[in-house]
Image: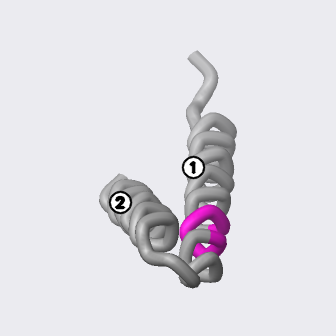
C-alpha cells in the first residue's frame, strides 16, 4: 500500500509541475502515465488478493 501511495503522490506532483511550468508537457505526460501504471498496479494487486483467499 505504501508503494501505491508514493506513486500516487509522485504522479500528482509531476502533473502539477508539468501543468504549471510552460514547456514541460513531457513532465505532465509522464505524470499521467505514472498514474495509469499506479491504477493498473492497484487493479492487479486487488485481483491477486481476491484469488488467494480461501473459500469458507
Q: Which residue is mark 2?
A: 9
Element assignment for label 1: helix
Mark with earlier residue (1, 2): 2
Name the one closer to the observer, 45 or 19: 19
Q: Magenta segment, which residues?
A: 29-33
Q: Is residue 40 magenta?
A: no
**Which residue lies at the image location 62% right of the left edge and 62% below the top edge?**
32
Checking the image for residue 42, the label placed there is 1
Q: Residue drawn at (68%, 39%), measured in percent from left and top?
A: 51
The dominant secondary structure in magenta is helix
Q: Are marks 1 and 2 in contact (CB under 8 Å)?
A: no
Label disc, if present, on residue 55 of the rendered structure: none
Q: Is residue 19 left or right of residue 47?
A: left
Q: Position of residue 38 (x, y in %)?
A: 56, 59
The answer to whether residue 29 is left or right of residue 9 is: right
Res. 7 in view: no
Number of numbered labels in the structure image: 2
Residue with the most extreme front position: 22
Amino acid at each position: 500500500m505504501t508503494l501505491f501511495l508514493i506513486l500516487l503522490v509522485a504522479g500528482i506532483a509531476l502533473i502539477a509541475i508539468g501543468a504549471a511550468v510552460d514547456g514541460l508537457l513531457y513532465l505532465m505526460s509522464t505524470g499521467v502515465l505514472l498514474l495509469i501504471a499506479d491504477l493498473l498496479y492497484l487493479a492487479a494487486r486487488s485481483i491477486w488478493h481476491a484469488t488467494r483467499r480461501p473459500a469458507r
